Image: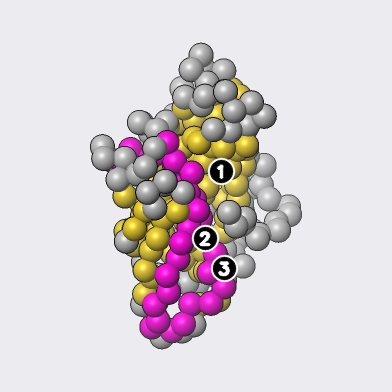
Amino acid sequence: MKTTRLALTSLATSALLLLTACGGSDSSDSRTDSATGSAASGDETSDSSAGSVEVVETGFGQRDEYVQGIAVVTAGPVGEFVTVSMNFLDESGQVVATEEQVENVAREGDELVLPVWLSLDDPKVKIASVEATASISDYGSAEEDYPDLGTYETTEITQDGYTAKFRLINPTDETVESARVGVVCYNAGGDIIGGGSDYPDLWPANGEIVVEASITTSGKPAKCIAHARHEGL
């Protein structure tokens, strides 16, 4: 699986919130929102003010010792960085591990997919749910929105469920370099059961490319959705 190529420093600190907390909390340099979810459920919080982040959906998929957490957020303004801290819990509610993922906001208000990866030391450990907390930096960026590159449903999922294939058509007349494709996979009931990501190096103007993204899911998905965007900064 390809990994995120962002090398970021001086990010706002993520503060892990309890499931019982409501809404977001303000600090001098970040705003935070939290949500919980599992392969079968997810809660939402909202914050519509400038410099805010909202956790829209959460879920995860597990195959042996490999766990792919997924957090879908909306955030703004463009140019800021979102950090998601995700707790992975077992059936007793104990936190097994905490991992983070960071992405930048390339288009305000769009759904941003953050795949949070976990490799367990013991493959016998079963994850039962996840808790996600999101924070956003406060750099005061005035960046303009990047063009909307669209969302795409899978054209094919391999029989073993390791790869999701997409046909992406660049809707702009500009070549896209270093695109980012976040993949969210769902079961027949519409619950997130994992996903993955891919990073095409070159996407021709008004051109079509095929992306084969490695995915980690709990069973074979009914469908996967690719969220394509500029990788940005």
| Pointers 3 and 1 in contact (C-beta within 8 Å) | no
In the image, what residue type sits under mark 2?
Asp
The mark nearer the N terminus, 2 or 3, is 2
Q: Where, quadrant-wise, is the N terminus in this rendering?
A: bottom right
Crowdedness near tag 1: few (<14), some (14–19) or many (≥20) residues, C-alpha within 10 Å: many
Check disc 1 and report the residue beneath it: 116
Check disc 3 and report the residue beneath it: 232
- Residue 216 counted in the magenta span: yes
**Among the 4 quarters of the image, the one containing residue 32:** top right
In the image, what residue type sits under mark 3?
Gly
- Tag in front: 2 or 3: 2
Q: Which mark is residue 204?
A: none
**Which span of residues is magenta-colored?**
190-218
Q: Residue at x 57, y 23 (%)?
A: 124
Q: Where, quadrant-wise, is the C terminus in this rendering?
A: bottom right
Locate residue 13 relative to residue 195 in the image: left or right. right
**x then y, percent, for residue 148:** 39, 70
In the image, what residue type sits under mark 1?
Val
User: Mark 2 to mark 1: distance in Å?
Assistant: 14 Å
Asked whether residue 25 appears in the rendered view, the answer is no
The mark nearer the N terminus, 2 or 1, is 1
Q: Which mark is residue 198?
A: 2
